[in-house]
Image (cartoon, rainbow, N blue to C red):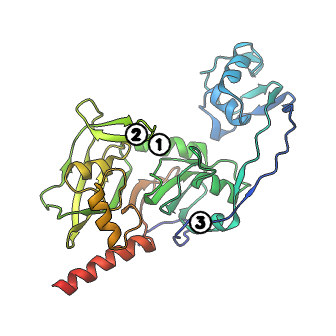
Amino acid sequence: MSRSSGHRRSSATGPDSPAAPAANSGSAAGVRQGVRKVVVDEDNAGQRVDNYLMAQVRDLPRSIVYRIIRKGEVRVNKGRVRPDTRLRAGDEVRIPPVTRKPKPDQVVPGSRVQSVMENAVVFENDQMMVVNKPSGIAVHGGSGLNFGLIEVLRAARPQARFLELVHRLDRDTSGLIMVAKKRSALRFLQDELRHKRIRKHYHALVSGQWSQELVRVKEPLLRFELRSGERRVRVDAAGKESLTLFRCLRQFGGYSLVEASPVTGRTHQIRVHSCWAGHPIAGDDKYMDDVSLKAFRSVGGDRLMLHARALDFTLPSTGEAMHLEAPYDEAFARIVAKLSARLETSG
């Protein structure tokens, strides 16, 4: 199991939960704030003025942010600034009166889904947390979704001043995802990702017998959209350089359990590289052919069999090396156990 110096909680399954509408306290004419003067703290040092302002005045259109900066209404230490001016700890920022349009009623995650997500936290300290995300819940709301993992965590922790995703997982992929609790931690972890110092290891159940000799797929990936607007990815010479390392863990009748370690971080990278290798991930309704998908459903498969199993990273501020692992959820574990039992019976 995982090792950590912070607080751990057990993993959880299923995000199903009732939700309640949030009250809208704004008037039809909008909400207007007076002049504010805010002192920049250490955690926000180095941030651009435009980004800092948008964080301070939520839901303010970017066009208005640039306009009030250009007109000199935003001042830093009583002086005019540009949008890309970097702030320092101790700077005093003058935020002028702005009128925000009232937000429509929003759906707030219910107490049940909040509890599920809190129980899915496997590591936490004052800088960050790592969550074993259930399959079926998006990492953030949008595109017809009222909320995702980050909105649920914010609802469960209304006192938290800062909670931001460090990276992302597909909605149907389960497993470990990092969330920063401080801006400095977010900057550190994203810089670690850019320099490939964070290692992610996934477990995937794929169709067919994966060759022990197939350990490296380096094919360029290109994003495109279907006529419906749905995004997809394909191997294409015009795409971005991509590399995934594979290791076959176990072979079953008709399926293989593999470990996939992406070196690059492209959209759907593991899913498309597996499919290109002739072994689409079981339950993948985007890249698996209909016949194979139907066969997987016939053995009780009801989810994408891709799980972010382990993370190797360095803790912000302390520099401690971390290794975390997340167990499979019930649906993933059940299929693996069923295939194992079938293999033992046939043997």
Work out whether residue 276 can be spotted.
yes
Picture layout, residue 182 above or below residue 343 = above
> How far apart, in angstroms, are the residues tagged by discs 1 and 2?
6 Å
Identify residue type, mark 2. Answer: Arg
Secondary structure under tag 2 reads helix
Say which residue label 2 marks: 194
Residue 259 appears in the figure: no
Crowdedness near tag 1: few (<14), some (14–19) or many (≥20) residues, C-alpha within 10 Å? some
Q: Closest to the observer: 56 or 211?
A: 211
Q: Disc 1 to disc 3, how far (Cα)?
A: 30 Å
| Residue 227: percent from left, percent from top | 42, 35
Amino acid under disc 3:
Asp
Q: Label 3 belongs to which residue?
A: 16
Neighbour class for label 2 at 10 Å: few (<14), some, many (≥20)? few
Determine the residue located farthest toward the left in the rendered image.
213
Q: Percent position (x, y) of residue 128? A: 56, 54
Q: Position of residue 242 (x, y in %)?
A: 28, 40
Q: Position of residue 279 (x, y in %)?
A: 22, 57
Is there CB contact under 8 Å for labels 1 and 2? yes
Quarter of the image where the C terminus is located: bottom left
Q: On screen, 187 above or below 130?
A: above
Q: Quadrant of the N terminus?
A: bottom left
x 59%, y 21%: residue: 84
Residue at (76% x, 42% y) in the render:
104
In the displayed orientation, state which residue is furthest to the bottom.
345
In the figure, 76 relative to 166: above or below? above
- Secondary structure under badge 1? helix
Toward the top, the furthest residue is: 71
Q: Residue under label 1, please give it.
A: 190
Q: Amino acid at mark 1?
A: Gln
